[in-house]
Image: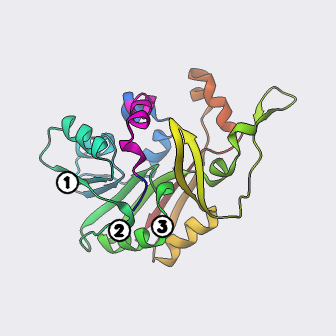
């Protein structure tokens, strides 16, 4: 079973104050890049893995999706998603992605934002998602970039231009990593980029687009703190097709 850190009161309180949770998709700098990777949603049946507060599920319905199934391990997340959603075509379920069961050939799009780095058996999940999609359907997801995860954040230094720099720690050693974020001991799973992409290919997907997200100049001008993200990629965005 995946670690259910999101139901920890201290973690949930801090996480709920992030701009992407207060402002929704508009508060996520990577959202324009993700949106460009998505197909037209009119008439589609959508699967949202790690749906959180339901921001994407509601957006998908506004874009014309016929139905959305949102899945999350966190009871607090699902309770908030249900409270913020008044749409019978959106269903939210509490379930562990590690052992997820899905109906075969039932979805036209599978989507996930920043959830899979909490999953130990990524291969099982990818195979299950592949079977749940109809032929030609897209699987679009974001994860914490493995270089970002492998950086030893407490030990950054400043370069000659005054910019923070992080070393990459044991990048080739995949597996469990612990970090302190809102609370101590948050468990994540580090995988190299090649492992992530080859797992998709091995499950039968065709990789269509990969982006190592970096903020645009306009985004940095609006929010100067984003300049730090040019030092090392923070997120990996992937589109694959069944």
On whether residue 216 falls in the magenta region, the answer is no
Q: Is residue 229 above or below residue 200?
A: above
Which label sits on residue 122? 3
Question: Range of the magenta residues?
Answer: 4-21
Q: Position of residue 22 (x, y in %)?
A: 38, 28
The answer, for residue 19, to whether it is visible in the render is: yes
Q: Earlier in the sequence, mark 3 or mark 2?
A: 2
Give the secondary structure at mark 3.
Answer: helix
Q: Position of residue 107 (x, y in %)?
A: 27, 64
Q: Quadrant of residue 2?
A: bottom left
Mark 1 packing: few (<14 Cα in 10 Å), some, or many (20+)?
A: many
| Marks 1,3: beta carbons within 8 A | no
| Marks 1,2: beta carbons within 8 A | no
Give the secondary structure at mark 1.
Answer: strand
Q: Position of residue 224 (x, y in %)?
A: 63, 23
Magenta span dominant secondary structure: helix
Give the secondary structure at mark 2.
Answer: helix
The nearer-to-camera label among 3 and 2 is 2
Q: Classify the position of the C terminus by image quarter.
A: bottom left
The answer, for residue 59, to whether it is visible in the render is: no
Q: Which residue is mark 1?
A: 67
Q: Which residue is mark 2?
A: 99
Q: Earlier in the sequence, mark 1 or mark 3?
A: 1
Q: Classify the position of the N terminus by image quarter.
A: bottom left
Residue nearer the viewer, 190 or 23: 190
Give me the residue at 40% from left, 53% from top. Answer: 112
The nearer-to-camera label among 1 and 2 is 2
Q: Is residue 58 above or below residue 65?
A: above
């Amino acid at each position: 079973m995946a670690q259910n850190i999101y139901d920890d009161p201290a973690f949930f309180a801090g996480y709920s104050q992030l701009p992407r949770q207060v402002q929704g998709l508009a508060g996520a700098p990577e959202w324009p890049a993700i949106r460009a990777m998505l197909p037209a949603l009119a008439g589609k049946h959508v699967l949202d893995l790690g749906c959180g507060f339901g921001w994407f599920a509601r957006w998908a319905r506004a874009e014309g999706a016929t139905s959305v199934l949102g899945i999350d391990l966190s009871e607090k997340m699902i309770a908030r998603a249900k409270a913020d959603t008044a749409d019978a075509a959106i269903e939210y379920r509490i379930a562990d992605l590690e052992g997820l069961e899905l109906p075969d050939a039932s979805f036209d799009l599978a989507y996930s934002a920043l959830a899979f780095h909490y999953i130990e058996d990524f291969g099982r999940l990818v195979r299950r998602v592949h079977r749940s999609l109809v032929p030609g359907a897209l699987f679009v997801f974001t994860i914490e970039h493995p270089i970002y995860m492998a950086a030893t954040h407490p030990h950054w230094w400043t370069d000659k231009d005054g910019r923070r720099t992080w070393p990459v720690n044991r990048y080739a050693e995949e597996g469990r990593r612990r970090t302190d974020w809102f609370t101590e001991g948050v468990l994540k799973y580090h995988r190299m980029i090649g492992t992530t992409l080859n797992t998709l290919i091995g499950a039968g997907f065709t990789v269509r687009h990969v982006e190592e997200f970096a903020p645009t100049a306009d985004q940095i001008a609006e929010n100067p703190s984003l300049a730090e993200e040019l030092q090392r990629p923070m997120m990996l965005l992937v589109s694959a097709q069944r």
